[in-house]
Image (cartoon, rainbow, N blue to C red):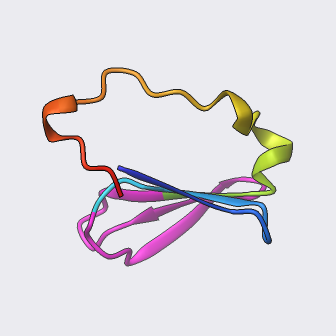
């Protein structure tokens, strides 16, 4: 899982899979879920993220440190 935040557009993308998205559905105003060809969730796009989330409190929990890759 990867989190991508773009401050210019104030959008947060949560990348849940390396599989490409084939379909997308807006589930709430400014929140779009991406699905692969099999209907599995592969990502979540949150527009105007700073209005919906407190990005300063982002924390990780139960990170598999043995497989942790620092970018």
| Residues in magenta, as a range | 18-43
Seen at 21% across and 30% down, the residue is: 64
Would residue 16 be found to the left or right of residue 37 on screen?
A: right
Name the outermost residue toward the left: 66
Seen at 36% across and 53% down, the residue is: 16
Q: Considering depth in this image, is 53 or 28 the residue closer to the camera? A: 53
Q: Position of residue 28 (x, y in %)?
A: 71, 50
Q: Position of residue 49 (x, y in %)?
A: 75, 50
Q: Is residue 63 above or below residue 53?
A: above
Q: Quadrant of residue 18?
A: bottom left
Q: For residue 27: magenta?
A: yes
Count of numbered circles on the image = 0
Would residue 40 be found to the left or right of residue 52 on screen?
A: left
Q: Is residue 42 above or below residue 67?
A: below
Seen at 75% across and 58% down, the residue is: 30
Q: Quadrant of the C terminus?
A: bottom left
Name the outermost residue toward the front: 70
Would residue 63 be found to the left or right of residue 5 on screen?
A: left
């Amino acid at each position: 899982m990867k989190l991508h935040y773009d401050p210019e557009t104030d959008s947060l993308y949560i990348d849940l899979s390396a599989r490409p998205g084939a379909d997308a559905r807006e589930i709430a105003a400014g929140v779009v879920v991406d699905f692969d060809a099999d209907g599995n969730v592969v990502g979540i796009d949150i527009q105007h993220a700073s209005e919906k989330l407190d990005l300063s409190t982002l924390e990780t929990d139960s990170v598999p440190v043995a497989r942790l890759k620092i970018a």
